[in-house]
């Protein structure tokens, strides 16, 4: 599979490439076969390279042997080939698929109208989630091991909140400064950690504060996919909602010019999640009204995560 990656250090845009991989691979019936990824772009190493390594480690023993035959030592080490590592005398592939760019992916929202958000959840998106999380990443997760769809089995609600941190996405990223950070982070953590159903004692919160920049990619997917409610400021990390189970919830915090962007509302809808948006003031630093946020979590818990709630 031959890719030209564009915004290769951005999870949202890499998700569009991976979904293309899934759609084309399914159509061409190659998802169960040996797959070699070839990058035609000249990008430097980036933080998401390890994800591509996971994708390409299917049938790893066969792929290592193929890498030896093609004489590029980097292939079996990284799990993919950069075009500069090909034999300078020429390389022939028996079967090659030139992938469409991520901007032409079915899950890329650029150019879509606001009406697209009314589309119902898509079975293909769920199949994509299952393929990635269970088959390719081998995450030990059973759809029935918590109460996303069977709320009568437990009153513990897993609530995860992604906090943005400075990190170096790629060598050209300069200082790696991140915008849209939450200024009252500790207050938010304290309030949500102590949240519970005071009136009927039907539920309580199992809260997790997440800094995904410090986690290996597989761990990111595993942690996010287990949450019942995911909270985060608008940013590429919310693309992880595609790994969450249908019937989960996303609360997106937006500010300034980001309030009119539909990226993760669309993702949540297509994945079968419920979606809530919280608009706040701020730019590089955002102050979150903890009463408002806690009230939304409480409303969601009472409506969907008690034994008497509809599924």
Image (cartoon, rainbow, N blue to C red):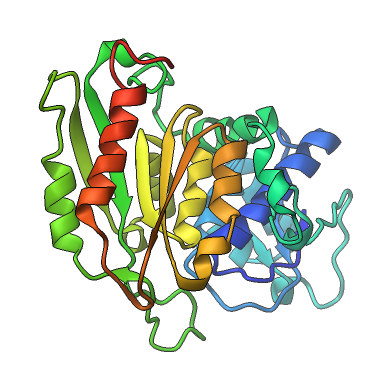
- Along the line of sight, which residue is nearer the eye, 255 or 171? 255
| Quarter of the view holding residue 125 | top right
Q: Residue at x 67, y 39 (%)?
A: 118
In the displayed structure image, the side of residue 173 where residue 43 appears, left or right: right
Q: Work out whether 85 lies above or below 151.
A: below
Q: How many marks?
A: 0
Q: Residue at x 35, y 15 (%)?
A: 309
Give the quadrant of the C terminus.
top left
Residue 146 visible within the image: yes
Q: Position of residue 136 (x, y in %)?
A: 55, 37
- Along the line of sight, which residue is nearer the eye, 173 or 114? 114
Q: Position of residue 30 (x, y in %)?
A: 78, 37
Q: Residue at x 61, y 49 (%)?
A: 56
Residue 137 visible within the image: no
- Along the line of sight, which residue is nearer the eye, 251 or 124? 251
Q: Position of residue 301 (x, y in %)?
A: 29, 29
Q: Position of residue 87 (x, y in %)?
A: 78, 72
Q: Work out whether 172 lies above or below 105.
A: below
User: Farthest residue in the bottom direction?
Assistant: 174
Q: Work out whether 218 lies above or below 102.
A: above
In the displayed structure image, the side of residue 170 where residue 70 appears, left or right: right
| Quarter of the view holding residue 297 | top left
Q: Work out whether 185 lies above or below 266.
A: below
| Quarter of the view holding residue 152 | top left
């Amino acid at each position: 599979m031959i890719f030209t990656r564009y915004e290769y250090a951005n999870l949202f845009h890499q998700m569009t490439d991976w979904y293309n991989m899934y759609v084309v691979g399914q159509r061409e019936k190659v998802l169960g076969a040996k797959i070699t990824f070839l990058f035609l772009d000249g990008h430097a190493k980036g933080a998401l390279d390890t994800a591509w390594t996971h994708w390409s480690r299917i049938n790893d023993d066969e792929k290592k042997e193929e890498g030896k035959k093609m004489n590029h030592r980097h292939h079996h080490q990284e799990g993919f080939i950069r075009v500069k590592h090909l034999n300078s005398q020429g390389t022939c592939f028996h079967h090659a698929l030139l992938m469409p760019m991520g901007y032409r992916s079915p899950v890329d929202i650029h150019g879509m109208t606001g009406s697209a958000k009314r589309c119902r959840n898509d079975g293909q998106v769920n199949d994509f989630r299952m393929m990635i999380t269970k088959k390719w990443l081998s995450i030990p997760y059973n759809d029935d091991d918590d109460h996303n769809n069977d709320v009568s089995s437990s009153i513990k609600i897993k609530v995860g909140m992604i906090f943005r941190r400075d990190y170096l996405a790629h060598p050209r990223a300069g200082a790696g400064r991140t915008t849209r950070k939450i200024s009252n982070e500790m207050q938010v953590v304290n309030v949500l950690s102590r949240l519970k159903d005071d009136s009927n004692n039907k539920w309580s919160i199992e809260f997790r504060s997440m800094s995904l920049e410090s986690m290996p990619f597989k761990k990111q997917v595993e942690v996010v996919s287990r949450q019942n409610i995911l909270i985060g400021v608008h940013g590429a990390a919310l693309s992880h909602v595609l790994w969450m189970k249908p019937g989960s919830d996303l609360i997106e915090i937006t500010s300034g010019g980001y309030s009119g962007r539909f990226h993760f509302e669309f993702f949540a809808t297509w994945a079968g999640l419920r979606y809530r948006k919280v608009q706040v003031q701020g730019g590089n630093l955002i102050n979150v009204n903890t009463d408002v946020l806690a009230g939304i979590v409480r409303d969601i818990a009472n409506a969907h995560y008690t034994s008497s709630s509809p599924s």
